[in-house]
Every structure is written in structure tokens, then in C-alpha cells.
Image (cartoon, helix red, strand yellow):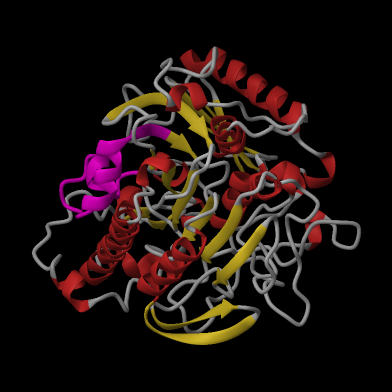
Amino acid sequence: MANSARPNVLFILTDDQGPWAAACCGNPEIRTPNIDRLARDGLRFEDFFCTSPVCSPARASLLTGRIPSQHGVHDWIRGRNMPPDPARYIEGFTCYTDVMAEAGYVCGLSGKWHLGDSVTPQHGFSYWFAMPLGYSVYQDAEMIWQGEVGRYPGYITDVITDYALRFIEETRDRPFYLSIHYNAPHSPWTGHPREIVDSYEDCPFKSCPQECMHPWGNPHMRRFLGDRESLKGYFAAVTGADIGVGRLLDRLDELELRHNTLVVFTSDNGFSCGQHGFWGKGNGTFPLNMYENSIKVPFIVSHPGRIPAGTVTQAMMSQYDFMPTLLDYLGLPAAKDDSLPGISFASVWLGQKGEARDEVVVYDEYGPVRMIRTQEWKYVHRYPYGPHELYRLPGDPGERRNLVDEQSSRPVVEEMRGRLARWFARYVDPAMDGVRCPVTGEGQMERIGPDHAPEETFRGFAEPPPGLASPLK
């Protein structure tokens, strides 16, 4: 067992896992015994929010503690992930892995990067087994190891777990940080182990009602509504990742590292599998949406002997809070930067108090769509013209009744709109402002910068490319 004053960190990130897609989150239909095991051994957040309901912006915010209108990643990265001309979309920003590497941690990645330049280790990582793009087939997939692209036989979820276990074996005597970024349960919802898929044959899927097509529903995804095979594939992908989680936890136990290891489990963004009448996340509709299933994800932290076991919190934490919280928990210096919006939730992790904010509010953005969320209210503002939305969540958790145009709601709308505008005015970098970006959900082609203005970097709607199920990554 490593003799370290600071704990190791295992950060497990799934891809497109809805906040409903785990048994410990209240879904009796999906099998996640190892995610549930983490929840029994640690703390689960019921209200953990993405900074943006799509992959790359959310991942950039987790690493940097910045909102998309500060780091400039506003949509899933479609361009310049691979040679001959890769771009590093978060270069120049300090990530928590930079701080950890400087403090002596060995940092490893196994899985999806999707922040540009997938070939080159960066931001403190020295071990780098990465997915070339932001999506992949599940059988015999391409991965990058030691700077070379190769095809790896077998189920990609298992392969990512294998290389994560290899890293643990190689660094077990030194303090380590390991990111395990599964592609699951991202599309395609095919290629998963047959025995897992078949085990859902008789599932009624009551947790995923296939509602009538949303009036804004993305037509590329229409074919998945009512498709039981896709539901079986999504559930199988989650269970496949859960098996990987179990292998990682078992190995930590075998090496006597578990009590010296903080394990974090979460996802990049949420997902709907028919709820509200669409399949997808924030770009499952156009205009882009901020439904709870899109902006919330499972979030569990577990560290035996330090984080109280079997606890659940209603504290509202955002991905922009993760960097300051993790560094505080590890006793590492946080960035002295007043432009960072996050605060530390380490006291909540440790069970010292129930809330980390005096005023419980979170904010989200996806290009020109912005949201403010309190325990009671959610207000969504679409710049410049709308439509806007207001929901009173305690009486309408399914967000079925938009109150924004009701006369009685005008004071709430005015208050929420003002708070939203003031918060973003405080934190936005004008050069990276998402309100100026024509984000459609079809991908970001370039890094915003002197050579690429915001309005020139995003792809408009197009027919889906051949091959991988859906262009919406």
C-alpha cells in the first residue's frame, strides 16, 4: 500500500448517462450494483448539474472550473481532434490535473478525451490511453497508446478498464490520479455484450416512457422513439460500464488501496431516452433544451473513513464547483482567480453541513441558451428572441407547464432574468461569450481565438454522416 499523506483519486466519468440511469438514483429497472455499492459506501448528490448539457463544454468545465463562456468550448468538438492539424481547446487554462501533477501526483487517462488533440498527453497527464474522437464503435475500436492509433480487439468498455487497471498496477506505490472516461452509454446502442443486452429482453422500460415526438425534437433521432432494441442497448451500456466500476473497486481492495483512494463517479451530461418525446441531451431538440434530464447527472463520492457512508444530499452542486472542491479536499492550493465562479463543497462531502451556498442557485448555458435554477424555480432564456421558459419545480417536476407568459409569474420572471443577466455579466469573458455564438448542437469546428471568431466556428444543421448512429456527440 502506498504511504502517502494525500489520497489517490479515481475519477470515473460516463458519457450521456441520465440522472435516472442508475438503481441508486431510483430506477428499479436498470442493473448497476457497483455504482450502487459506491453510493452505499459514500455520498450521493440528487442535484448535481452540468455547466452545459453536451459533452465537450461539460468536460472542459470539470477540468478548468470555468463556464463555457470563459473557456470557449460551447459545443461538442467536431473538428481538429486528430492530425494533421489538431487543436488544444483548453490550452492556456489551468486544470486541476496541472495542480495535482505539480504536487507530485502521477496522472493517467484511460478513455475519452474529446477536448482536441487526442494524441498528445497534456495538462499534467503522463499516462495516456485515449479515444481518437468523441464517439466510437463498441467492438474492436481504435484507441491511442504511446502516440499511435491502433485497433483494440474486444468490447471497448472492457479495454478502457484494462488499461486503467494497468495504470493502477504501475503506479500503486506513488500518489496517483486516474481518469476513467467510458464511452458508455453514448450511441451507438449496438455492439454491447449479447448476454447483457438479452438480460433486458423482458424489461418493461417504465422508467423511459416513449412519449409523442417533441415539437422541437431533432429529426435525426426520431427513429429511436419506441425502439426497444435501442433501449436494451442503452441499459446494457450502463450495466457494462458498471461491471468496469466493479473491477476497479475490487482491484483497489485487493491492493489494499481502497481506504487511501477517493472515488468519484459521475457523467458529462444527462440524457433522455424518450422522456419528453426525444432521445438525446441539450441538442436532442432545437431550440436547444435545458430539461432536468439534460442538465443533471449522477454524482457520487466515496472515501471510506472520511466521507460518511450511505448518505444523500440535496445540496445543488455544479461542474464548475468540482475543481475547487477536489483541490480543497486534497489540501492543494486553489487558483487565486476571482473570475472563477465555483466554490468548494468539501464540507458537504465530509458531512460537516448540508449546504455549501448561502443562496442555492446554479447556472447553465449552451450557446445562446442560458438557465438559472433554484430549489423552487427554473428559468430558461434564449437570446436574442426566445422562446423562454419558467417552471415551478416542486409542483411540476416533469416541466410540463411553462409559466413564463402568465401574468402572475411576471415578478418571478423579472427577478430570475435579472439575476441570470447579472451573474453572467460578472463571469463571462467577452471574447468567449456564448450569446454571440450560433450554436446549433451540430458541433464546434475550431477553437475560438484571434484567427477564428465565435460566429465562424460552429456547424449548422446538416444531414447525419454515414456510419455512427447519430452526429450528435
Q: Is residue 244 visible?
A: yes
Q: Residue 248: where, in percent of width, then height?
A: 35, 58
Determine the residue positioned at 30% across, 50% down: 21
Percent position (x, y) of residue 53?
52, 48
Check the image and name the residue furthest to the left: 202
Which corner quadrant of the image does residue 395 belong to?
top left
Q: Position of residue 127 (x, y in %)?
A: 59, 66
Q: Residue 255 vs residue 110: left or right?
A: left
Residue 446 as seen in the image, left or right of residue 301: right
Q: Is residue 88 magenta?
A: no
Q: Residue 243 lies in what quarter of the image?
A: bottom left
Q: Tell me what residue is drawn at x 83 percent, y 40 percent.
A: 430
Q: Nearer the viewer, residue 329 or 69?
A: 329
Q: Nearer the viewer, residue 344 or 473?
A: 344
Residue found at x 31% / y 65%? 237
Is residue 75 shown above or below 140?
above
Q: Is residue 422 left or right of residue 429?
A: left
Specify whether residue 41 is painted magenta. yes
Q: Nearer the viewer, residue 206 or 327?
A: 327
Bounds of the magenta segment: 19-47
Question: Where residue 334 appears, x then y in whole percent?
Answer: 69, 32
Choose top left, top right, bottom left or bottom right for residue 128: bottom right
Compare residues 161 and 118 and report the one nearer the observer: 161
